[in-house]
Amino acid sequence: MSIAVAAGESVAIVGKSGSGKSTLMHLLALLDTPDDGRIVVEGTDARSLSAPALNKLRNSAFGFVFQQFFMIPNASVLENVVLPLKIAGMPRAERTARGMEVLRQVEMQDKARNMATALSGGQKQRMVIARALANEPRIIFADEPTGNLDSATGAVVEDLLFKLNAEHGITLVVVTHDEELAERCDRRVYIKDGRIVDSAATAVEVRR
Amino acid sequence: MSLTEIVRTAVGNAFRSKLRTTLTVLAIFVGAFTLTLTNGLGTGITNYIDSQVSSLGATDIITIGQASLAEGGAFGAATSGPTEYDPDKAVVAGQMGPQFAALTNADLATIRGIDGILSVEPLRMVSPDYIGGPNGKKYEFTVNPSPTGANVAVVAGASLGGSSGGGTGTSEGRQLLLPTAYVEPLGFASPAAAVGATVTIGVSDVFGGKHELEAKVAGVQEDTIFAFGMIVSEGLTEALYAAQTTGLPAAAAEIYPVAVARFSPTASTAQVRAIKASLEEHGYVGQTVADQLGTVNTVINGIVGVLNAFAVIALIAASFGIINTLLMSVQERTREIGLMKAMGMGRSRIFALFTTEAVVIGFLGSAIGSGIAIALGTVISSVLANGPLKDLAGLRVLEFNPVSVIIVILVVMLLAFVSGTLPAARAARLDPIEALRYE
């Protein structure tokens, strides 16, 4: 298969479970290496990057939003949000300021000191989005971001993601089996048994 | 992630599962506690022996006699077979009981010429009859024949300075250190009252003549396990010797059973060995205080070594506890590790994070263990020193040397680090995708 994601674009990878859509996202996010073929990031073959360079790229340019949230239990919302900054080695004061800023973006600033595990599902996902935003990524990978949420809170999270895409030009790669969510993306790639079976662009994709 | 951040996070992680961490810390605590106590025991007893050494003699002196003395049994280091009689050998006759092959002034000159020997003084054996105090009562006593160091432990007054100078007191004049046991019988109210007082010493010469000398009490000596008699100043020894040899011809008075030589206090073991070798070449034998105490120290070090081995076994058992705790921790945090790896945390940092957590657990266990051991040990040794061991003045059974306590803590931390490497390597190797999928 061949897939190209342009900067500022929103792409939905759609398929049933086991279709290989998550594997495709992992490949795109450089978490996995392909058995065959190449992944080119901004003109550089990912295989030519060393492990530390790969880590640095993921840390500085990628944001991750997972269906199961993956948060650090027994830690505050703020501590969870600043985790990528901590890994990047940002000093504490700077980190806290940046963490509060992204929490404001997802309207969670008043929950900063709360324990992460005490949040509701929608709040957890907004916290995870704030965490993905903390390092000012150029691309956000979202794996079933609304999978664990009811439709009302799911809609809030969706709106947030597309707002970031529209206002900050952050590229969005969403893995989903939710047709409605996929419809909102600029482009949809349908996966079945590890192959692209169809791809469609929405009419609004006129900007590129 | 910066190093301070790793340490801070590791400390936080260690306390995420409080009960588990506490139990592991407790296991290390037991080992570190025992190791600190056994070390304290070693230090306490060694320190006591060392302090006793000064009552036995200074550490920079060597006692020298004719080589044939060795077979005489006085030095205990027999070579082989009986020695043939040599009528030309000078012999200390009569006054000291058994006959000794003696040293003459010529021998002293030879010894003085040996490389490394700073000074030689003949050892004048004096055997006074009695000591009398202000209440008029007289008691038998013996004089410590060997010259002593300046730092004999005293309960009151000052110790006598060595003849090489230095020390708190002075060797000038006729002075002595009174053993504690003599304070009350001689009629002194307290050790402090005895200091500065004058006592009378009776001595008989070889012809039966009685002489009485006066001496000043410079200080009161602590009780010691090496009670080899009263320590007297060189001036007093000379006066007693002169009284004892009254009427003897110079040839008879100027022969001595042994001589005492001083070498540099900073001399190395090898240098001391060289001095002993050249003494042997000239037909003399020399013995230092270290030689006399060598066996005692070897036995004590052996006992402390065995006790330490038990403590180390406890620590090894505890280190398996660390491995277990961290393996469980890695298991529990698999997804978190996957997340951190996805976010770009490198393998080495993950490894550092978990080994640091192990070191934190090790540090907590050893610091608390050592701290409580020191507190408890100090109380126990005070109780013992004022109770059952009261008779051994100056003995503190448990003494804690900061350097060895710090070494114990560092060794435990190192052990914890080594234990942490297995779980940490497992965490570092985790594949982020597998880890995130882990249920």
Image (cartoon, helix red, strand yellow):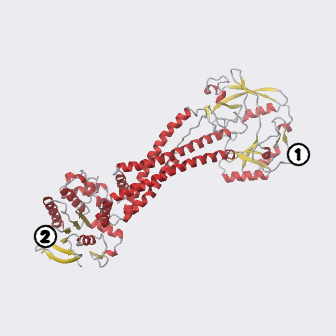
Q: Position of residue A207 (x, y in %)?
A: 13, 74
Give the mark count. Answer: 2
Q: Is residue B47 above or below residue B425?
A: above
Quick check: can you spot residue A88?
no
Determine which quarter of the picture holds residue B184: top right
Q: Which mark is residue A195?
A: none
Subunit that carries the residue with mark 2: A
Quick check: can you spot residue B197?
yes
Q: Position of residue A102 (x, y in %)?
A: 22, 58
Residue pushed farthest left? A203
Q: Nearer the viewer, mark 1 or mark 2?
A: 2
Left or right of B407? Residue A180 is left
Subunit that carries the residue with mark 1: B
Left or right of B371? Residue B202 is right
Q: Which kind of residue does numbered mark 1 sit on?
A: Asp
Q: Which residue is mark 2?
A: A183
Pick whichever, B37 or B347, lies toward us: B37
Q: Position of residue B175 (x, y in %)?
A: 69, 31
Residue pushed farthest top? B135
Q: Which residue is mark 1?
A: B88
Marks 1/2: CA distance?
A: 124 Å
Residue at 43%, 50% (x, y): give it.
B363
Q: Position of residue A87 (x, y in %)?
A: 32, 61
Q: Under tag 1, what secondary structure?
A: loop
Callout 1: few (<14), some (14-19), or many (20+) C-alpha neighbours within 10 Å?
few
Q: Under tag 2, what secondary structure?
A: helix
Q: Which kind of residue does numbered mark 2 sit on?
A: Glu
Residue at 78%, 33% (x, y): give it.
B241
